[in-house]
Image: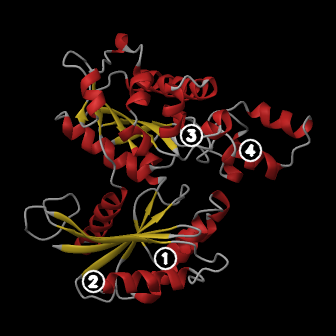
């Protein structure tokens, strides 16, 4: 068994999971049949907030070390093989998981303008972890990396190409570790590892991807996580002219427009609730605002499913994941309603159960609920990079 610590350092929190992974698991090591075990996990919150005992990321990582020690696992343990870090944005420089060096850390810092809210926190966690365990290999796993296989036709915006090149304006995609994990699990579920998969990652943030033979060929999020599906507080797709209109006519500043589209839109903007459970309750009571919000949400989903059926040509499986995707019977039902001509037919009883395959027996396309596990995917990719490095 091989122990890997996975760190997800946010601006005000650090999530961690310590995993023990065996050889039969992709990326595993050893010879134990591939067992995977979660040894410890937790979250350190309120980093740097007023009144918080956790002043910064150094203090947060010390707290993680204390929590691991209390659970019987020291961060200085010789059994710990590697540390894997989630990093939101890799730009075009980092298109695969990467062993962290001083040069790689500098590259992540250079990408801060593309992810000003996320990369600084990711980098802070990396810097502290490297100080705590300078002897361990540490790997950066980028949210954008899985989508780097998109063809140029899918990743390119139709704007002046020199401006786009100079300022990095292109489609990167996000939620990549989740899409990688779920697409692989979904393909294995139907026994077609080289098959075509549509992944619908639906949480407070939401994204869709079209995956062929394990490679992403399109995804809904673009240069930022704002593009694409309707989300909890984000608008998703919107006419860029609407932004210009708000600037010229309403006199809104760029900061105000940013706040509107990222924090006061989506389901929250449409009906005042970004919790899909509450929206579903209100829909059941006949609330017209909640009904419209759900209709907009599911219309956008259905449109992307149809578009990705066209992109892929044939689809073997559609996988729902994330908090909403895994738990909302209503969203799954409405998102795929009317797509029978595409060979997509849900079984109502299976959908209500929400476990595994939820499509009808006669459905040409398998529909399944596939719980995501981003930490396990990061651990797998971390071990894979280390094993490749050691072999090299």
* Disc 1 packing (10 Å; few <14; some 14–19; many ≥20): many
Q: Is residue 284 left or right of residue 274?
A: left
Q: Residues within 10 Å of mark 3 (few under 14, many from 20)?
A: many
Give the CA distance from mark 3 to mark 4: 13 Å
Q: CA distance from mark 1 to mark 3?
A: 29 Å
Give the quarter of the figure containing the C terminus.
Answer: bottom left
Residue at image mark 3? 231
Q: Decide: is 79 above or below 373.
A: below
Q: Residues within 10 Å of mark 2 (few under 14, many from 20)?
A: some
Q: Which residue is mark 1?
A: 126
SS under mark 2: loop
The reply to whether dot 1 and dot 4 touch (C-beta < 8 Å) is no
Which mark is first along the chain, 4 or 3?
3
In the picture, the disc for residue 260 is: 4
The location of residue 23, given as percent across then percent down, is 14, 64
Neighbourhood count class around disc 4 (C-alpha, 10 Å): few under 14, some 14–19, many 20 upward: some
Question: On the rendered structure, is 374 left or right of 255?
Answer: left
- In three-dimensional space, the C-alpha distance between marks 2 and 3, rounded to whole angstroms, equals 38 Å
Q: Nearer the viewer, residue 204 or 51?
A: 51
Residue 251 placement: quadrant: top right
Helix, strand or loop at mark 3? loop
Task: Please report whichever mark, 1 or 3, sits nearer to the chain's N-terminal start.
Answer: 1
Callouts 1 and 2 close, C-beta under 8 Å:
no
Q: Is residue 48 at all visible to an observer of this figure?
A: yes
- Looking at the image, tell me whether mark 1 or mark 2 is earlier in sequence order: 2
Residue at position x 45%, y 46% from top?
A: 147
| Mark 1 to mark 4 CA distance (whole Å) | 32 Å
Quarter of the rendering containing residue 388: bottom left
The residue that label 2 is drawn on is: 73
Circle 2/circle 4 CB separation < 8 Å: no
Q: Residue at x 25, y 84 (%)?
A: 72
Q: Nearer the viewer, residue 11 or 349?
A: 349
């Amino acid at each position: 068994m091989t122990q890997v610590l996975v760190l997800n350092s946010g601006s005000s929190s650090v999530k961690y999971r310590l995993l023990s992974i065996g050889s039969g698991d992709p990326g595993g090591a050893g010879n134990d049949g591939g067992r995977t075990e979660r040894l410890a996990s937790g979250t350190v919150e309120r980093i740097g907030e007023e009144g918080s005992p956790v002043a910064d990321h150094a203090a947060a990582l010390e707290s993680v070390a204390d929590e691991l020690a209390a659970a019987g696992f020291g961060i200085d343990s010789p059994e710990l093989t590697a540390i894997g870090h989630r990093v939101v944005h890799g730009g075009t420089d980092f298109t695969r998981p990467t062993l962290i060096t001083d040069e790689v850390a500098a590259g992540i810092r250079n990408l801060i303008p593309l992810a000003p809210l996320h990369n600084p926190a990711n980098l802070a966690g990396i810097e502290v972890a490297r100080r705590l365990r300078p002897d361990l290999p540490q790997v950066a796993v980028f949210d954008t990396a899985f989508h780097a296989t998109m063809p140029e036709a899918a990743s390119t915006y139709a704007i002046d190409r020199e401006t786009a090149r100079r300022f990095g304006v292109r489609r990167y995609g996000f939620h990549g570790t989740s899409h990688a994990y779920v697409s692989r699990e979904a393909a294995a579920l139907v026994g077609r590892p080289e098959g075509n998969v549509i992944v619908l990652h639906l949480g407070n943030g939401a994204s869709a991807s079209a995956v062929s033979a394990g490679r992403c060929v399109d995804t809904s999020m673009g240069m930022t996580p704002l593009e694409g599906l309707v989300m909890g507080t984000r608008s998703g797709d919107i006419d860029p002219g609407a932004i210009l209109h708000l600037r010229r006519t309403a006199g809104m500043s760029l900061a105000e427009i940013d706040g509107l589209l990222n924090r006061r839109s989506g389901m929250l903007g449409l009906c005042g609730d970004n919790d899909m459970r509450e929206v579903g309750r209100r829909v059941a009571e006949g609330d017209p605002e909640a009904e419209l919000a759900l209709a907009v949400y599911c219309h956008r989903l259905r449109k992307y499913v149809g578009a990705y059926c066209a992109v892929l040509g044939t689809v073997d499986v559609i996988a729902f994941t994330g908090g909403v995707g895994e738990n909302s019977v209503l969203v799954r039902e409405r998102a795929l309603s009317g797509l029978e001509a595409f060979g997509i037919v849900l079984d109502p009883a299976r959908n209500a159960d929400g476990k595994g395959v939820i499509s009808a027996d006669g459905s040409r396309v398998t529909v399944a609920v596939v719980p995501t596990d981003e930490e396990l995917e990061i651990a797998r990719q971390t071990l894979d990079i280390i094993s490749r490095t050691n072999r090299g």
